[in-house]
Amino acid sequence: MADDAQPVASSPSAPEPAGFPQSVAEVREALGRVGYLADEPAALVAYLAQRLGKPILVEGPAGVGKTELAKALSRATGRQLIRLQCYEGLDEAKALYEWNYRKQLLRIQAESADPSTPPGGSAGPDRQTGGDPRSPDPWADIFSEEFLLTRPLLQAIAATEPAVLLIDEIDKTDQEFEAMLLEVLSEFQISIPELGVITARTHPIVVLTSNNSRELTEALKRRCLYLWLDYPEVEREMEIVRLHSPEIDEQLARRLVEVVHMIRQLDLKKPPSIAESIDWARALLLLGADDLDRSVFERTMSIIVKHRSDLDVVAERVGLKLGEPSLGAEAAG
Amino acid sequence: MSRRPAGLAPRLLAFCEELRGEGVAVGSSEILDAFAALEAVPWKQEEDFREALAATIAKSQEDRRVFELLFDRFFFRASEAEALERGVGEGQRHEGGDRLDLDRLRESVRQAIADGRDGEMRDLARLAIAAFGRRGEGSGVIGVDVQRIRRALGLQSQAGSPEEPALDRDQINRFERHLRRELERALIERTEKLPPSRPLAELDRALPTSPAQDLAAVHRAVAQLKRRLATVGHEQRGRRRGAIVDVRRTMRASLDTGGVPLRLKHRPKHPRRPEIYVLCDVSTSVTSASVFFLSVLHALHDSFRKLRSFVFIERISEVTDIFERERDFRAISERIGREGGVADVSGYTDYGRVWLEFLEQIVDDLGPRSTVIVLGDARTNGREPHPEVFARVAERAGRTFWLNPEPRLYWNYGDSVMAAYEPHCTAAFECWTTRHLEEFVNVVAGGTPSGEA
């Protein structure tokens, strides 16, 4: 148990905790088994994150599977996924910990109602500082772990089983929050003024994602491994689509992915994500479409294009191109 | 695990030094991480080695691009330098070139490119140099030779004829890179010295360039400004007394006093989220400043969610969409130039008309929470300035600022009518450097709202 509590980075030669792959190829394979086809850099960074005990900072356009990477890591390693969704105004009471004041109040009232202990009242603060620690002292023990509400970060640090901590969309928070994260990410510990420092019992794999909507601080980047995820190439996206809807015909899958790539080239408000390619493939299966001609495309394109102005652009630029091959096929047949 | 050869550590440090020279912030913690990462991966594969370094050293997309450019060059040079030092050469490398069947070579090159096999491409590149480089012994300029060989091989990204299908552009580029590298290697062997190492050209780094201004410099400044803008205004958040009692925190604080709420806690006051309307003059009289102004707009868009921007010359046109959709600065300025829709007859600014149009389109949205920022020189080219219309705009808006790219000294000289507008503004600033801009930013975001609480 004591050995397990050591961060992995400090003893690289020690055997890894069970369940984590031992090489880049194995990471890739393990991720593949749970339905995430990682490319070489992603697998390598995931592997390094575990070996070096460093957080991963994943950046890239929306919908390339940044969040999914963390989820896949948790599935592949059988670790619990602890997720902290960031938003503007997120503060430590929601991210780190909070004292359960209701319970604390009840305890105080219970203590003062109990005749065996002297009443609290105004003598309280003095007793807290000068009191004898051995005597039952309500002032000392209302600030104990019993009254602590753990929020995701503390939960990940205090977990007895190693976890995967996902800090999603870190760019939505403000810089103060980033600064607060630094202690957690580099030391894997949290200081609670009333309680002291809580150090990680196990070493979580930390994944931070950012949509690059603002520049993150150097201090944060310095502590992370950096991974840029981009839209996959046609071949890999085809594999992904076929992995998630295996019944789809190979020809159709290729055509679908090629169209999606064509659409991503356009100047759109929201280019289609990988998840949307998969949804589209499923929709086509349900409709029983065996080819992607213009009418099928126009009926189903709302699955991948979700802005009114984008719809017009796509219908005009891609829809027209799609018309031709099916016409040609009709003429030939 | 393979041991690290003695030469790697200093070499890696030299590489980091070169990255620093190109403006990538590589700290010592990054370097330590890089070494730790190299311990953890078997770096017999070039890709693993490269990715492990990149993940620990290059922490943004921009840094990554510089990293890629330098990585190739640096390690190529390093190995060539080593070869020179030890006198390792390949001797008659072009031997046998004459005996090659050119058509078969052409076919194999096409095949290798289509399959994207790197090792094969490299071997074929050497064969191609041997086959085609012979005649005339090359021009001595590597770029010229690369193009000559490429033409001789008939490599095109467009389909030329039915039996020569189109090849992927990127793959051809990869082949060209091999060609270039092999030619360089041959040149180094011939001359027995390395060409001097140059810093990356700005063009290579694909940064926006402009003849008039050093955009990269503006960009760096704006990046800093961006960061400041993103946090400024939050300073006010703190635990200042607000009007509303925060029950949860009051109860929480009361625990120190035995559950008796002696100290009231207030909800922190949230900073005013400004609604900003920016009008930016893009006419010829402010050409030198408009690049700067557009970068400012760009930075503002990154930092304020409620921002609408307009460009104007003779007429006004909303460009909020362009800024929200594009993140790349160069693309933005191109698109504004192309479809800004301020296309005009004379190319002269008409402030009066701009106010009228702005008032007509926007005035209903303006309110006490909105801030109007005008970026312009107030030179009306002798047209009617309509200060009374501007006054109405300023009246509707909570605050109105004017940023003038000319020094205060020149205001109101010639056709500048700044004096007509200035009294209606909350404040007017001279603004043509980032320092001026920061002063202004402090006023807008620092939240010294004049007249309202």
Image (cartoon, grey):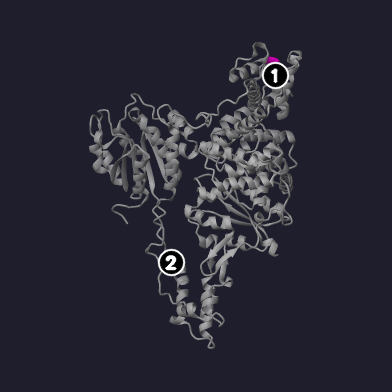
Residue under label 2, please give it: B246
Residue type indicated by callout 1: Ala
Vertical placement of B359 versus B81: above or below?
below
Q: Choose mark 1 or mark 2, whichever is in front.
A: 1
The answer to which image quadrant residue B434 occupies is top left
- The numbered mark 1 sits on a residue in which chain? B
Whether residue A332 sits left or right of residue A191 in the image: it is right
Residue B308 seen in the current view: yes
Tell me, yes or no, whether the highlighted magenta stretch contains residue B337: no
Which residue is more in the foreground, A245 or B408? B408
Whether residue B427 sits left or right of residue A194 in the image: it is left
Q: Which residues are magenta?
A: B128-132
Residue A280 seen in the current view: no
The answer to which image quadrant residue A302 occupies is top right
Numbered tag placed on residue B86 in the rendering: none
Local crowd size for mark 1, using a 10 Å CA cut-off: few (<14), some (14–19), many (≥20): many
Question: Where is residue B101 drawn, in percent x and y?
Answer: 76, 14
Marks 1/2: CA–CA distance: 77 Å
Which residue is more in the foreground, B68 or B248? B68
- Residue drawn at x 68%, y 15% is B132
Which residue is more in the foreground, B135 or A162? B135
Residue under label 1, please give it: B128
Question: Where is residue B345 drawn, in percent x and y?
Answer: 35, 24
Circles 1 and 2 in contact, beta carbons < 8 Å? no
Residue type indicated by callout 2: Asp
Decide which of tag 1 and tag 2 comes sooner along the chain: 1
